[in-house]
Amino acid sequence: MAAFLRRPAADQSAMAGAPFHSWPSEDETVWMAFYRIEGGYLLRFPSLADFQICGDDSQVICTPAPDASEADIQHLYLNQVLPLVLSALGRSVFHASAVELCGGAVAFVAATGRGKSTLAAAFTVAGHRLMTDDGLVLDARDGRYEVVPSHPSIRLWEDSLSAVMPSGLEQSPSLSFTSKARLMAGGPIEYGDQPRTLLGAYFLGEAVCDEVLLHRLSEAEALCEWTKHSFLLDVHDRGNLREQFDRVSALAVAVPCFRLDYPRRFAELERVRDAVSETTAALV
Amino acid sequence: MDMTIRYEISDQVISREVGEEAVILDLESGTYFGLATTGARIWQLIGQGKTLEEICDRVADEYEVSRADLSNDLIALAQDLTARGVIRPRSSTA
């Protein structure tokens, strides 16, 4: 694992040039800006922190902004920076949640805001252990893929929290940049801390439907979807892109993938859970 | 369109055949797209240096489709792939 070092808090100085890439926030401001610097990269979360990624071993050096909390820094490192670092080190990392199911694991793959955390939460309250809320790491082993357990927490919007989880759950300290509630594993949220074979991946649709829809993707469709939802530190690094494409090509052939779409009503979650469970059971 | 054209695939492009389809990744732009069945076969034949006419004959025979329809689709696909920068006409040799 790459080393993580901390510098004292400091104001974020202006960068010499424009970022080569950026991720937008939901309000279309810049959430994270990617810069190339001598020896590596700098990831800037405006008003929160800078993370320098340096060296062959991708050491991470964080300079928090003056008002950033410890909870902010930990979250940014674990959920945003570390997946990118792992991708640069040749690991396959995706925007997905995962839960244990049918003796293995299933992944729910989607962009931010499509419901992958809520769906994972719906499985945890039914007794299935959570493996990751985002930043799904997959390791290839002997022709199958293992889900690597990640940080044992889940973040939910208030309405999802109220609708899906039991009341009175202890929440972790809030983050300054989001109103999502953070729940650590424990109590009703059991955490799976052992790698599990990925049995199937479910790519969440855009909720343009009146019922639960689930169909198998072709291998080419799966390859495009995995590519779309990959964490990539440098989207212009051709060597890395080529390697990632090769890894994802093998993944798309090896693991059954499905398009899953459903109306985003909490009352539908039990039906969705049943459909996923039934489909996954048929794969085993 | 000149059906004797041969194309070459940009060296900034990688592709993978999965099942009967092909997925093409443009390393220059980071964009990717898929070609299904006949499109994937056309892509394969382009990579083998066949002329558009040869591709049309081969695919029409293999997939038992109308040559006239196929010719239009083939030209459209070649133009689209050229516009995306993933293929370019080969320079002629003596």
Image (spheres, coloured by chain):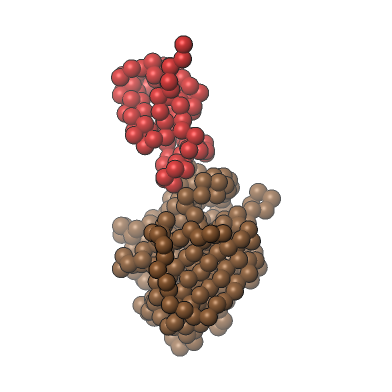
Drawn colour of chain A? brown
Q: Is B14 rendered above or below residue A168?
A: above
Residue A284: percent from left, percent from top: 60, 55
- Describe residue B66's horizontal placement relative to residue A129 as left or right: left
Residue B59 visible in the current orientation: no
Q: Residue at x 34, y 58 (%)?
A: A206
Give residue A129's quadrant in the image: bottom right
Residue A158: percent from left, percent from top: 37, 79
Q: Is B11 rendered above or below residue A45?
A: above
Q: Is B2 rendered above or below residue A43?
A: above
Q: Residue at x 63, y 58 (%)?
A: A56
Residue A205: percent from left, percent from top: 38, 57
Residue A18 visible in the current orientation: yes
Q: Residue furthest top?
A: B94
- Describe residue A74's horizontal placement relative to residue B69 as left or right: right
Q: Nearer the viewer, residue B22 or A204?
A: B22
Drawn colour of chain B? red
Q: Is B93 rendered above or below residue A66?
A: above
Q: Residue at x 53, y 73 (%)?
A: A62
Identify the image quadrant of the N terminus of chain B.
Answer: top left
Residue A33: percent from left, percent from top: 42, 63
Q: Residue furthest right?
A: A142
Q: Residue at x 33, y 63 (%)?
A: A263
Q: Nearer the viewer, residue A108 or A226?
A: A226
